[in-house]
Every structure is written in C-alpha cells, then in structure tokens.
Image: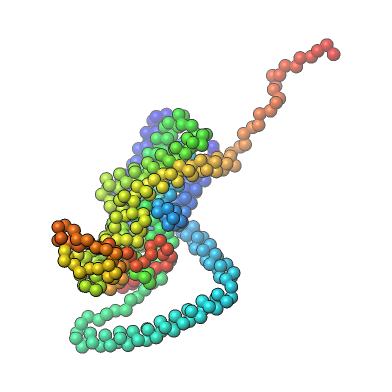
C-alpha cells in the first residue's frame, strides 16, 4: 500500500456521495436509495490500516451529512463503528471469497441505517420512519451485498495499478543442484 | 496492530463526531453548506453534461416535430397572453375595490428561478439543494414552489446554494386551508411509505368537517412563512379521529417530487 490508494479511496467516497445525491433512479424505481459508503468502508477496513478507516469515516460521513438532513456527524460515527469492528477482526475474515464479501457488504449496509437511526432517535431528531422504511432497509442492504464483490474487484485492480506489480515466480533456483553424469 | 492504536483512533473519531453533533444549529447549517461546497465542481459538471445531452437531443429531433412543438407553444403563449390581459384588468379592479374599502393591498409574486442540483441521499429526510443562494437574494424561510404548487421552504442558504426543506419532511409543517370549505388545518408528514412519496396528511380539521375527495388544499397564510393561496394538493380521502373530535385527510401533493428539476423561490 502507498499513500495514493487511501487518497483515491477518499475521492471515490466523495464521488459516491455525490452520485447518491444526484442520481434518483434507485429512489424512483426501487423506492429506496442505495448507499455506497458502507461498501467502501468494508473494503478500507479489510485492506488498509486504521488511519484510512478513520479518514474515510470522517470525510465520507461529513460529506454525506452535508447534503442530507442528518445532524452533522451521525454518519461518521456509524461508519467508523463498522470500520473499526471489521479492522479489529480482519485476521478472521475471509477477504478473498466472493460470498464473504457479499455477507460483509450486506451486514454493513444493513447495520449503518440502524445505527444512524438509533443516533437520530437519541438526538431527538424526527426522521421519517414507518412500515415503508423496512422495504428501504432491505433494498439498501441487499443492493449493498450484491455490489460489494464488484467493488472489491474494481478496487483491487486500482490498488494494483498504484503499487508495484508482484514479482512472478521463476523456475530458476539459485540453490539448485546440478547432477552431472560421467559425460 | 496494537490494541492501543485501535482505542486512540476510536476516541479521536468519536470525539470529533460528538463535537460536530453538539455545535449550535446555526453553525451546523453554515458548516454543512461549506462542506457541500466541495461538490460545486461536480454539480457544475453534471449540469454541463445535462445541457450537452439536451442540446444533442434537440439536434437529432426531426424538424417537423420541432415545428409542431413551436406551433403548440405559440398557440399556448397567445392563450396565456389573453388570460393575463383579462387578469390584469381583474387585478386592477380588485386593487381599486380594496383601496375603496381600505383593505390591505395584494402584492404580486416576485419569483426567482433556480435549478435543483441535489436531493437528500438519506431515505428519511426530504430535502433538496438548489443553485440559488444569498447572492441571488435567497434567505431562510422563503417559500419554494413549482408551477404545479408548493414544494417547501428554504432551510439554510449560503452565497451560491440553498437547502430546501420539502413538504412531507417531519420538520416542515404548513398551515393549510380547504379552498372549497374554508376549514383550516396543518399539513404534516404522511406515513412515509416508499410508494407514497407524494402524499401528506392534513390534520386538526374540525370533527364535523365537510372535506371531500377532490377538494383543493392551499396555504392559509396563518403560519407567517407561506403566503395565502399557494396550491398544496388535492384531497384523496379523509377519516375522523379522536372519537370524532378531529378529521384527518390524506393529500396528494400537486408538485411531483420525483421529477422536479426547476423551482421558483418566492421572494418578499
């Protein structure tokens, strides 16, 4: 990892927030907005260090709240709890497997709205919550789960582009033994 | 990675989050609009792309269609001019009668055009951002409408952008009136179903209300923010509540919130 990759991740986070505010297709056709920040947080926590996780939570969370009716900081806290939890146990998580990525994305995208909602209720804010919110929650979680493996593939490629290519294993062994016959 | 580093990061981010959450409301609005300024180039780019698409679409539109559209618009324009002429006469007559009866004068609407550049990315708020700010004379609590009806009010404004709190958000309540019966009530958020994006409730109507489906709901002008007579929507159905003490009606908003691109800010 070099310093360019986390910067690129922050740029992607800001683009993701902009896309969510600009593109209304999901809202019109599915009745719910799909969130990309938890997906990026899953990737960041399993790939980079805790500094990148904190930076993504602060930058992504503040950008999201700036365009939303949320009190400033609620998304930051929720995102960081997800990233922090995953980063603590990343040694136990099967990062490379597609279904593990799906489950992690689904769990993160399901957990974030719940945590934000708890914060909003604790802050005495008045969010629009009803039976329809269950549909929105389900769609957001499922879409997050489906998108996460694709996001991992794309970001892994980007990560490779910004780093040294892995050295290909050669057939040559410096300690090889040459057995010579009589001739 | 050591546990200590984990806990340090945890406390730093939580500290920052808690500081942000405890800022005064006015400061938060300003900070939020300042942070949203990061997106200015992207909003500009999105606007340019949209214009480009519109331009190329108009380039490939057949000439006959354009001529037909032009004819229709000319016809509509003539009709509107005639209506305006008639209404100017009525307005003048109304002003004269008001003067004779020593009633307060009716002022004509002063509107400022704006484009919707972003919508709330969260599912539980109804806000939008428009590309007109304090530099264009926009300030908080100004009414925002479309040609169909009321949309909401300005909740925060910076020099180039403003945030609009849309009808249906739990933080926006509007004093409303049934045009046909004159009964007053309060418009508030509906049940928030994702399929009922354009529905709100009209509450606190009298128990013996004469409200019927199809009646028009307009602003009553009682709240002090919205002028009287701006169309909000039409009644879908109604039911009595609180043992017949109160009537509540479901209202279909006149403005379609899913497709709004342009709005008008009602200036003082």
Q: Quadrant of residue B251?
A: bottom left
- Total of numbered circles in the picture? 0
Q: Residue B137, position in %: x, y?
A: 36, 70
The colour style of the image is rainbow
Nearest the camera: A56 or A20? A20
Q: Position of residue A21 (x, y in %)?
A: 43, 55
Query: x, y (%) of residue B230?
Result: 30, 72
Q: Nearer the viewer, residue B215 or B52?
A: B215
Which residue shows up at 47% across the image and 35% down it?
A100
- Image position of B192 with respect to B3: above or below: below
The residue that appears at 37% across and 83% down in the rendered structure is: B84
Is B180 or A81 nearer to us in this picture? B180
Q: Is residue A15 above or below residue A89?
A: below
Is residue B180 toward the left or the right of residue A171 in the image? left
Question: Within the image, what quadrant is residue B201 found in?
Answer: bottom left
Q: Taking the image as drawn, is residue B223 in sight?
A: no
Extreme-right residue of the structure: A183
Whether residue B42 sits left or right of residue B210 in the image: it is: right
As drawn, the residue found furthest toward the top would be A182
Please name the residue shown 52% across and 34% down the image.
A96
Where residue A157 sits in the image (x, y, percent)?
57, 41
- Say whether residue A183 is visible: yes
For the N terminus of chain A, the quadrant is top right
| Residue at x 65%, y 31% (from the top left corner) | A168
């Amino acid at each position: 990892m070099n310093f360019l990759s986390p910067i690129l991740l922050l740029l992607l986070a800001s683009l993701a927030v902009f896309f969510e505010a600009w593109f209304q297709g999901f809202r019109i056709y599915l009745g719910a907005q799909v969130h990309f920040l938890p997906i990026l947080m899953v990737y960041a926590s399993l790939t980079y260090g805790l500094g990148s996780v904190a930076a993504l939570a602060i930058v992504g969370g503040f950008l999201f709240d700036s365009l939303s009716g949320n009190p400033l900081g609620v998304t930051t806290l929720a995102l960081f709890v997800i990233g922090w939890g995953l980063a603590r146990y990343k040694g136990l998580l099967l990062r490379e497997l597609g279904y593990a990525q799906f489950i992690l994305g689904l769990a993160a995208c399901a957990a974030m709205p719940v945590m934000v909602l708890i914060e909003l209720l604790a802050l005495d804010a008045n969010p629009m919550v009803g039976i329809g919110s269950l549909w929105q929650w389900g769609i957001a979680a499922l879409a997050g789960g489906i998108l996460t493996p694709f996001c991992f593939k794309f970001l892994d490629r980007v990560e490779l582009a910004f780093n040294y290519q892995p050295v290909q294993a050669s057939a040559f062994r410096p300690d090889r033994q040459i057995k010579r016959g009589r001739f | 990675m050591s546990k200590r580093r984990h806990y340090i990061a945890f406390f730093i981010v939580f500290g920052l989050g808690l500081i942000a959450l405890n800022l005064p409301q006015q400061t938060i609005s300003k900070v939020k609009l300042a942070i949203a300024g990061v997106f200015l180039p992207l909003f500009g780019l999105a606007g340019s792309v949209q214009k480009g698409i519109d331009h190329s679409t108009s380039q490939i539109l057949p000439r006959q269609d354009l001529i037909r559209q032009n004819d229709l618009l000319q016809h509509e324009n003539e009709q509107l001019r005639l209506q305006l002429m008639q209404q100017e006469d009525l307005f003048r007559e109304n002003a004269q009668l008001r003067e004779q009866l020593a009633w307060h004068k009716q002022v004509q609407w002063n509107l400022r055009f704006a484009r919707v550049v972003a919508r709330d990315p969260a599912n539980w708020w109804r806000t939008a951002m428009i590309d007109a700010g304090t530099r264009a004379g926009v300030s908080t609590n100004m009414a925002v409408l479309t040609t169909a009806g009321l949309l909401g009010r300005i909740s925060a404004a910076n020099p180039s952008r403003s945030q609009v709190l849309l009808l249906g958000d739990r933080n926006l309540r509007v004093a409303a009136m049934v045009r046909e019966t004159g009964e007053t009530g309060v418009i508030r958020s509906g049940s928030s179903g994702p399929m009922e994006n354009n529905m709100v409730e009209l509450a606190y109507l009298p128990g013996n209300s004469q409200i019927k489906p199809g009646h028009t709901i307009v602003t009553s002008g009682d709240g002090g923010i919205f002028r009287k007579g701006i169309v909000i929507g039409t009644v879908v159905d109604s039911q009595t509540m609180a043992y017949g003490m109160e009537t509540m009606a479901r209202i279909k908003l006149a403005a379609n919130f899913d497709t709004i691109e342009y709005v008008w800010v009602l200036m003082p």
